[in-house]
């Protein structure tokens, strides 16, 4: 899975993206820039408000695996996934439903 690593690129997605919220995650979806090609990328963010490093890392791992099951990366889109409280403890079925809801609302498929 290709990830967005540059903070400059993540900031660009934050400025231009469409936001779709769910109680377990927030998705910011933007079209890929013209010159970069059709391949989609994904970024996973867990802010310090969630708790300590262990909880934030677990939240990112859980989001990464759920995104993989949901078909990420999506061609033609840069997607930033932000963990919310409860993401790390959520069962996989709940995260799959959350991703299904986010994908349906955003029209990624």
Image (cartoon, rainbow, N blue to C red):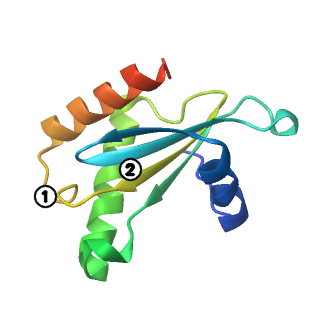
- 16 vs 50, left or right, is right
Task: Identify the residue at image location x=40%, y=54%.
Answer: 82
N-term-proximal mark, 1 vs 2: 2
Question: What number of labels is visible?
Answer: 2
Secondary structure of the residue carrying tag 1 is loop
How busy is the neighbourhood of tag 1: few (under 14 within 10 Å), some, or many (20 plus)?
few
Is residue 68 or residue 85 the one in the foreground? 85
Secondary structure of the residue carrying tag 2 is helix
- The part of the image, by quadrant, that contains residue 86 is bottom left
| Farthest bottom residue in view | 52
- 56 vs 28, left or right, is left
Expressed as whole percent of the image width and height from the top left, the position of residue 64 reads: 38, 50
Expressed as whole percent of the image width and height from the top left, the position of residue 5 reads: 63, 62
Q: Are marks 1 and 2 in contact (CB under 8 Å)?
A: no
Q: Is residue 54 above or below residue 15?
A: below
Residue 20 tag number: none
Expressed as whole percent of the image width and height from the top left, the position of residue 24 reads: 24, 47
How busy is the neighbourhood of tag 2: few (under 14 within 10 Å), some, or many (20 plus)?
some
- Distance from disc 1 to disc 2, alpha carbons, whole Å, reads 14 Å
Residue corresponding to mark 1: 89
Residue corresponding to mark 2: 64
Q: Is residue 70 above or below residue 62?
A: above
Is residue 57 or residue 22 the one in the foreground? 22
Expressed as whole percent of the image width and height from the top left, the position of residue 90 reads: 14, 50
Q: Nearer the viewer, mark 1 or mark 2?
A: 1
Task: Identify the residue at image location x=26%, y=82%.
Answer: 52
Task: Identify the residue at image location x=31%, y=81%.
Answer: 53
- The part of the image, by quadrant, that contains residue 75 is top right
Task: Identify the residue at image location x=36%, y=60%.
Answer: 60
């Amino acid at each position: 899975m290709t990830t967005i690593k540059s903070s400059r690129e993540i900031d660009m997605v934050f400025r231009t993206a469409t936001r779709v919220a769910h109680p377990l995650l927030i998705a910011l979806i933007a079209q890929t820039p013209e010159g970069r090609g059709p391949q989609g990328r994904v970024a996973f963010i867990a802010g310090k408000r969630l708790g300590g490093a262990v909880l934030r890392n677990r939240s990112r791992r859980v989001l990464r695996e759920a995104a993989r099951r949901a078909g990420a990366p999506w061609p033609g889109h840069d997607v930033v996934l932000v963990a919310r409280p409860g993401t790390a403890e959520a069962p996989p079925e709940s995260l799959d439903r959350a991703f299904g809801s986010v994908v349906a609302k955003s029209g990624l498929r």
